[in-house]
Amino acid sequence: KKWEQKYKDNLAGVFIFELKSLIGRLIKSQEPNIDCSSYLNLGCGQTKYEGFVNADFFCNFRFWSNRTAVKPDWELDFRYPLKCDNNVWEGVYTEHVLEHLYRDDVVKLLVELHRTMKVGSTIRIVVPDAQAACQDYVAGKFVSEDEQGVKLIWQLTQNWSHKSVWDFDLLSEALADCGFKKIQRVSFLEGRQNALLKDSPHRRHRSLYVEAIRG
């Protein structure tokens, strides 16, 4: 069985992505529609939640848009400053998003999220757990043929357009450096705010769940 190739970087793909980002930031970039109790679902993909501003990368450009994709409430490029006021989010939820950014871009994003969250609000982050994956690799615990042996590490570090890997220590360090407090590891569907418990069951295996407070 051949390994998946569609996430492999190439010049054409990078060019189109950066062009969409540039056009989006010049033409489509706008402030989100926020009410007094808005939460942020950062990297919503195909899933939108009520009571949240569901944000994701620019979409629906003519000629290359995916017409079946769910249009986000707020279109943006996470690598750039958020066009958003200070102290607006009641909480932030992001699931399997940060690993698609380089570490320095994650830090810049966390700084922006800290700025735009209300004091005392919670951020809930779900990412692939590098520690759990490495432990399973050493122990030989594989759940499918697609992750047998070192394929498991490849899935974590290179497939799916992954740009960074995270364990609790590294993510805690990044959150602390960006001003977040009371950083703690939590479990699937367990945390401080019920509104943020949106964890996908199919991602429960080998996911890291971390929460922190906006200081």
Image (tube, rainbow, N blue to C red):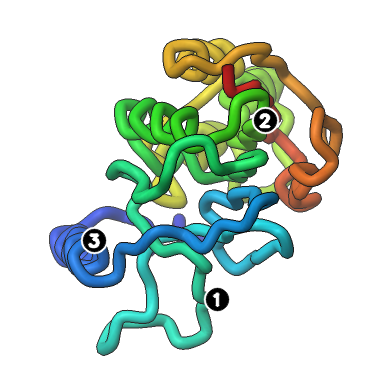
For the residue marked with disc 2, what is the amino acid? Thr
| Horizontal side of residue 77 vs 148, given as left or right | left
Residue 137 visible, this angle: no
Give the image location of residue 138, x and y in percent: 63, 18
Disc 2 + disc 1, Cβ < 8 Å: no
Look at mark 2 in the image and give the residue it sits on.
Answer: 122
Q: Secondary structure at mark 1?
A: loop
Q: Residue at x 70, y 20 (%)?
A: 139
Residue 124 appears at what percent x and percent y? 66, 34
Task: Give the quarter of the figure containing the C terminus.
Answer: top right
Q: Is residue 207 above or below residue 184?
A: below
Residue at the image point whose x is 76% and y is 49% from the top: 198
Q: Residue at x 50, y 75 (%)?
A: 71
What residue did someone put label 3 on?
A: 25
Q: Is residue 190 left or right of residue 96?
A: right
Q: Kindly report the distance in space between the C-alpha atoms of the residues bearing marks 1 and 3.
A: 19 Å
Q: Nearer the viewer, residue 7 or 198?
A: 198
Q: Nearer the viewer, mark 2 or mark 1?
A: 2
- Is 115 or 136 nearer to us in this picture? 115
Near mark 2 (Cα within 10 A), the count class, few <14, some 14-19 or many ≥20, is many
Spatial CA span between label 3 and label 2? 28 Å
Residue 60: x percent and y percent? 38, 80
Q: At label 3, which amino acid type do we have?
A: Arg
Reading the image, the residue beneath label 1 is 70
Task: Give SS at disc 2.
Answer: strand
How packed is label 3: few (under 14 Cα within 10 Å), some, or many (20 or more)? some
